[in-house]
Image: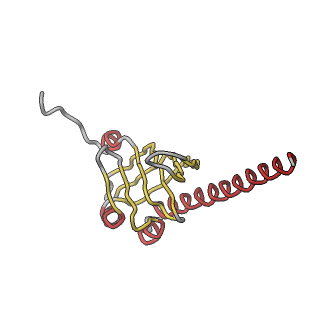
């Protein structure tokens, strides 16, 4: 009887691990495909990866956006600002958060990327981290962090303290 109970426990663990592994691989592939859509500046495909209740945060504290406005912003940027977006050294890792407010399946993307601006405005290279929460094969939430001031500095902006 002990052997039967142990075998059942082992089988349960193996089955649960394999389903987590399958989701991990599928989730990483989803984010890789999303990144490809960003590089291709294909707003329609990007939108197909976002859930209707998608909510994005960042890069600044307090920045937040829903799916509809995110796609409107991307459309504007593609038509008016960006000539090319190139992810380099892009790496993904999947994690399952078991408890708390952000419980669920996540993929974190760390990347060095180049953004080429239109009309000779320049190119910036940034290190960015975006964490994507995935539910039902869609991105429902993302947190994006990068140094906005450094990107602006690379474009020639100078920061001054208006108090001085």
Q: Can you name the residue that lies furthest to the front here? A: 1
Front residue (pair 5, 138): 5
Q: Residue at x 59, y 56 (%)?
A: 28
Q: Quadrant of residue 30?
A: bottom right
Front residue (pair 138, 161): 138
In the rendered view, would you say 150 is above or below 91? above
Q: Residue at x 32, y 57 (%)?
A: 65
Q: Residue at x 62, y 58 (%)?
A: 23
> With 21 as the anchor, is 89 left or right in this view?
left
- Give the position of the C terminus as an image quadrant: top left
User: Residue 103 in the image: x percent, y percent?
Assistant: 49, 50
User: Residue 99 in the image: x percent, y percent?
Assistant: 51, 45
Front residue (pair 25, 152): 25
What colour scheme was applied to this rendering of the protein?
secondary structure
Front residue (pair 160, 21): 21
User: Residue 124 in the image: x percent, y percent?
Assistant: 39, 47
User: Residue 68 in the image: x percent, y percent?
Assistant: 33, 67
> With 106 as the anchor, is 152 left or right in this view?
left
Q: Can you name the residue that lies furthest to the left here? A: 163
> With 18 as the anchor, is 122 left or right in this view?
left
Q: Can you name the residue that lies furthest to the bottom here? A: 44
Count of numbered marks: 0
């Amino acid at each position: 009887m002990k052997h039967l109970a142990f075998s059942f426990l082992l089988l349960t663990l193996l089955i649960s691990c394999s389903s987590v592994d399958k989701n991990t691989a599928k989730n990483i592939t989803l984010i890789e495909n999303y990144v490809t859509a960003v590089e291709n500046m294909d707003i329609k495909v990007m939108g197909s990866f976002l859930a209707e209740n998608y909510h994005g945060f960042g890069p600044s504290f307090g920045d937040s956006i829903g799916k509809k406005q995110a796609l409107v912003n991307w459309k504007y940027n593609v038509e008016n600002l960006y000539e090319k977006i190139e992810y380099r050294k892009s790496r993904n890792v999947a994690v399952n958060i078991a408890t708390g407010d952000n419980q669920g399946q996540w993929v974190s993307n760390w990347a060095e990327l180049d953004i080429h601006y239109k009309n000779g405005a320049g190119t910036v290279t940034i290190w960015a981290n975006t964490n994507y929460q995935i539910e039902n094969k869609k991105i429902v939430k993302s947190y994006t962090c990068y140094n906005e001031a450094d990107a602006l500095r690379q474009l020639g902006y100078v920061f001054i303290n208006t108090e001085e």
